[in-house]
Image (cartoon, grey):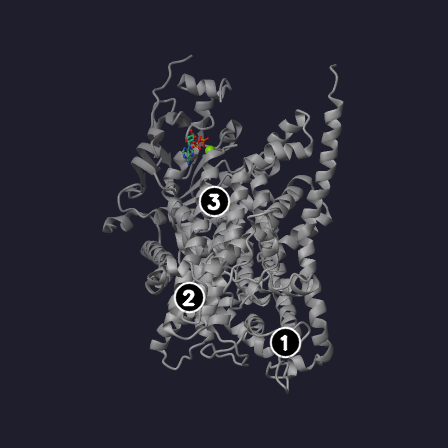
């Protein structure tokens, strides 16, 4: 690429040295570019291998029988019915606590709270809470919800533990969504005589639903995959029944008994199967893992698209 | 108005009509530049004389910065940029835009000082030594010597000699900019490019830097972009006036400020636009 | 002036006043959660620390609080946590930093925009799935290279944990590297430096406190990770620093005890809260340090 003439004509004392250093730097850059690209592909490859691996040993197990059977001592007859029902019920509890509480906390911190040491304290607290290991939420739930509040080893205790766990995610997402709305929008609402809450309810919340929804989906996907806090409250038991139905055929048509029912969940069921010897149980575990992966990666994918979409549509 | 001497792109005639042909350092020929599809420089041809200060003036957005950054191939850092034409560095006449020319080598011959001081998050000493190390100088004694020389040449030595190993960010804005000058001249480049080096500084810091630039031309060729006409008048030997990506007029600074050849130049200098 | 709609304004005022209280309570709810964690850990582990002499935590070499002749050497659990975290960091810090440099300084913006969220998926994978992968895929693979590797090993768990925390390093690291101003890079390029040189000599020091905060938060994440180590590193406490062996971490011990019957107030029950308290203090330290570094980075830039 470099002709001999090039370094004869540039005037300097150390031309050869300079020339050599420049081309060395260029080839270092080229090599690093290749290494970086390979590492990126390799790292993403782990994800692909993980999925293929689960599919290879689990795909064959997935059928209606697997979806609609209770766990069993015989691997071939076992299924994940009580696990996915339990996961759905847990998510109902988690979402109905974490979403309103988290969104409200986000609104408070972003729109209401004064800039003072109390607010600083809450903020540091949230940042730390986001880094508390999930198993400690389980210990809190065990001491507080299971024994202190006497909820027992129930859907309610598990759902609340997961709600506390994902609360910081919802708060942070809400705050970030609100922060992208320019001050001019708030001022426009106030200028028309809106109270602060009216500005929030009529303008800020509707304009930030995209961002908040993204955060809520990510929070729920985190909660679905968690097993450690559920294990500590004692959810790892053999559950071959479904919690009582929330909807009844006769008056009062609704029941909340399911909240206090023992439960199992998808990641717990998978853990149970992983820790058993025997290839058959391992392919049950792979099948449950495949489900979990598809659900969480799917939710994350939706969140990514939603975030892209929100960014593209709103240009303040 | 008296008969206007023909505008000459290279060389200049004095009143007696005798050719005074200074040695040319950078020879820009038919240079066009594109940011993607957007053409910003149109066919600029200009001979920058050696060991002189050449100022580039013109209204904001006319392409001064763009031209300056062609000379050390800074545009290569971003995708989609395209040069046409040639820029030859003398003596030798290598085309620095030519195929196969390594931008890194070009940059080792051209120093650059930016609009805002941009010292690295390192010590004063390490800032100045950075370019020297890149050129392969590793011995502490050589480095010490060259760092001191560069700091003396940028009139900073006395102010910083007792704290060479403190962070450069603790210096004042003017000192930081002089440090950046020291960094640029430490490696003995052929040409130093200045892009509005005083636009972020107060008048006292500005005049110090102007003095430095005048002093510097004994050793290097200087090209300076400025939107401050007084500054161009004070420190430059030659001035190039640009407008909308074209070079309108190029000549000796005194002549151009008193007797511009082109009506656009006169309008600009007399403050009728820009 | 026209007449103001007085009645509806009064209602608005009530709503406003009520909502302020609802929102303020929600804001403080997160503090309540922290409070709940701290109080539970303290009160439930108090009996444990009450009857175990403090000295024995450090002088005993085994952690067997449930045995008839109990030993209380918390060091056995801490060693497991230290080794698995160490292995994970050996993967995540070099690889994560490399990816951060590559994405921030070398990759095309379009490529980066696609790849970054995909990398973040690595930390969204349920940890029980990672545990499965470590135990049933990676360990057999490692056993081909090193046949004496036991079925449960800290090496295998640590390696997979390293993959899991890569996004913490890469994402935060890349953000802080990209927030180093372009003007600074240009200063170095103008002196003739190459891309990697600029990245290592100018961008890296400029973003260092941001990167350091990424490392510290990744450490905290590794220390608190539970399922991968519980599944793949083994559940038996063992005082060893050899990653080729199996040993329980602080978190794995909690899982191991929780798997059994756990009556309220039993010694087992108390011991997992004691382990939890230790875990809380460790991660709290890392989290506070990480956030302090991050704040410093934002103030500096
Ligand atoms: N990175 C860029 N991409 C596209 N256009 C640019 C870019 N930088 C500058 N321009 C355009 O090029 C023209 C010249 O800019 P510049 O050289 O910075 O002007 P000056 O320094 O004379 O004020 C302007 O119209 C500007 O909008
Ligand atoms: Mg400019």
Q: Which residue is mark 2?
A: A78
Element type at mark 3: helix
**Image location of residue A280, percent across then percent down:** 37, 70
Choose between C267 and B65: the one closer to the eye.
Answer: C267
The crowding category of the residue bearing disc 2, from other C-alpha atoms within 10 Å (few below 14, some 14 to 19, many at least 20), is many
Q: Which residue is mark 3?
A: C182
- Most extreme residue toward the bottom is C69
Q: Which residue is mark 1?
A: C268
Chain of the residue on which disc 2 is drawn: A
Separation (CA) of disc 3 from disc 2: 59 Å
Look at the picture and state if B13 lies above or below B194.
above
Choose between A51 and C215: the one closer to the eye.
Answer: A51
Q: Is residue B246 left or right of residue B179?
A: left
**Between tags 3 and 1, which lies in front?**
1
**Between tags 3 and 2, which lies in front?**
2
Chain of the residue on which disc 1 is drawn: C
Residue B76: image quadrant is: top left
Choose between A217 and C92: the one closer to the eye.
Answer: A217
């Amino acid at each position: 690429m470099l002709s001999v003439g090039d370094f004869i004509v540039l005037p300097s004392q150390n031309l050869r040295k300079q020339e050599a250093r420049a081309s060395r730097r260029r080839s270092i850059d080229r090599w690093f570019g290749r290494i970086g690209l390979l590492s990126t592909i390799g790292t993403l490859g782990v994800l692909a291998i993980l999925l293929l691996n689960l599919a290879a040993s689990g795909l064959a197990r997935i059928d209606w029988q697997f979806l609609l059977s209770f766990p069993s001592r015989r691997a071939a007859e076992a299924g994940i019915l009580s696990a996915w029902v339990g996961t759905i019920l847990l998510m109902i509890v988690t979402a109905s606590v974490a979403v309103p509480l988290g969104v409200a906390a986000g609104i408070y911190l972003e729109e209401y709270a004064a800039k003072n040491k109390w607010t600083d304290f809450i903020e540091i607290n949230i940042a730390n809470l986001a880094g508390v290991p999930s198993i400690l939420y389980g210990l809190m739930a065990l001491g507080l919800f299971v024994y202190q509040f006497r909820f027992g080893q129930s859907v309610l205790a598990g759902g609340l533990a997961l709600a506390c766990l994902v609360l910081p995610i919802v708060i942070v997402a809400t705050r970030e969504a609100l922060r992208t709305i320019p001050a001019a929008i708030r001022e426009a609402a106030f200028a028309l005589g809106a109270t602060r809450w009216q500005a929030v309810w009529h303008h800020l919340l509707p304009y930030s639903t995209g961002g908040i929804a993204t955060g809520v989906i990510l929070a729920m996907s985190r909660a679905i995959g968690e097993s450690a806090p559920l294990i500590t409250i004692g959810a790892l038991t053999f559950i071959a029944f479904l919690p009582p139905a929330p909807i009844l055929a006769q008056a009062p048509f609704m029941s909340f008994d399911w909240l206090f029912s023992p439960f199992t969940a998808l990641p717990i069921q998978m853990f149970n199967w992983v820790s058993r010897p025997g290839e058959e149980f391992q392919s049950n575990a792979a099948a449950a893992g495949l489900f979990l992966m598809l659900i969480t990666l799917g939710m994350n994918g939706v969140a990514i698209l939603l975030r892209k979409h929100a960014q593209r549509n709103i240009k303040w | 108005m008296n008969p206007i001497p023909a505008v000459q792109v290279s060389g200049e005639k004095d009143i007696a009509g005798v050719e005074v042909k200074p040695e040319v350092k950078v020879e820009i020929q038919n240079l066009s530049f594109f940011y993607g599809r957007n053409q910003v420089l149109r066919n600029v041809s200009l001979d920058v004389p050696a060991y002189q200060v050449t100022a580039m003036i013109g209204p904001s957005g006319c392409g001064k910065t763009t031209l300056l950054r062609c000379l050390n191939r800074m545009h290569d850092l971003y995708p989609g940029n395209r040069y046409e034409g040639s820029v030859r560095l003398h003596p030798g006449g290598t085309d620095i835009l030519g195929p196969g020319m390594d931008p890194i080598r070009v940059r080792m011959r051209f120093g650059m000082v930016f609009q805002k001081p941009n010292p690295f998050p390192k010590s004063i000493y390490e800032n100045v030594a950075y370019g020297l190390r890149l050129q392969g100088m590793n011995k502490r004694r050589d480095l010490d010597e060259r760092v001191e020389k560069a700091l003396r040449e940028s009139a900073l030595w006395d102010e910083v000699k007792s704290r060479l190993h403190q962070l450069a960010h603790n210096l004042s804005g003017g000192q930081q900019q002089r440090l950046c000058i020291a960094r640029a001249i430490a490696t003995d480049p052929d040409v130093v490019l200045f892009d509005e080096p005083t636009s972020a500084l107060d008048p006292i810091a500005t005049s110090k830097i102007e003095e430095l630039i005048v002093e510097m031309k004994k050793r290097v060729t200087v090209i300076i972009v400025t939107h401050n006409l007084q500054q161009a008048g004070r420190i430059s030997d030659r001035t190039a006036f640009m407008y909308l990506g074209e070079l309108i007029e190029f000549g000796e600074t005194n002549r151009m400020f008193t007797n511009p050849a082109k009506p656009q130049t006169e309008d600009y200098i007399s403050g009728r636009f820009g | 002036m026209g007449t103001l709609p007085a009645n509806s304004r009064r209602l608005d005022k009530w709503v406003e006043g009520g909502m302020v209280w609802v929102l303020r309570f929600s804001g403080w709810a997160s503090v309540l959660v922290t409070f709940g964690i701290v109080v539970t850990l303290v009160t439930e582990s108090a009996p444990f620390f009450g009857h175990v002499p403090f000295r024995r935590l450090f002088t005993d070499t085994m952690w067997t609080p449930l045995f008839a002749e109990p030993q209380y050497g918390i060091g056995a659990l801490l060693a497991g946590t230290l080794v698995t975290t160490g292995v994970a960091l050996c993967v995540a810090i070099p690889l994560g930093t490399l990816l951060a440099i590559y994405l921030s300084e070398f990759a095309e913006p379009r490529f980066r925009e696609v790849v970054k969220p995909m990398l973040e998926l690595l930390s969204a994978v349920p940890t029980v799935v990672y545990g499965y992968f470590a135990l049933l895929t990676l360990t057999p693979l490692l056993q081909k290279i090193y046949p004496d590797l036991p079925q449960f090993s800290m090496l295998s768990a640590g390696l997979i944990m390293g993959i899991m925390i890569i996004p913490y390093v890469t994402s935060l690291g890349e953000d802080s590297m990209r927030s180093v101003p372009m003007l600074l890079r240009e200063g170095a390029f103008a002196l003739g430096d190459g891309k990697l040189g600029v990245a290592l000599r100018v961008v890296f020091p400029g973003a260092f406190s941001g990167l350091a905060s990424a490392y510290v938060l990744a450490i905290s994440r590794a220390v608190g990770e539970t399922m991968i180590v519980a599944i793949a590193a083994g559940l038996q406490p063992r005082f060893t620093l050899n990653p080729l062996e199996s040993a329980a971490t602080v978190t794995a011990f909690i899982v191991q005890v929780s798997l059994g019957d756990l009556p309220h107030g039993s010694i087992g029950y108390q011991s997992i809260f004691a382990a939890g308290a230790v875990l809380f203090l460790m991660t709290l330290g890392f989290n506070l340090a990480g956030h302090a570094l991050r704040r410093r980075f934002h103030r500096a830039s």
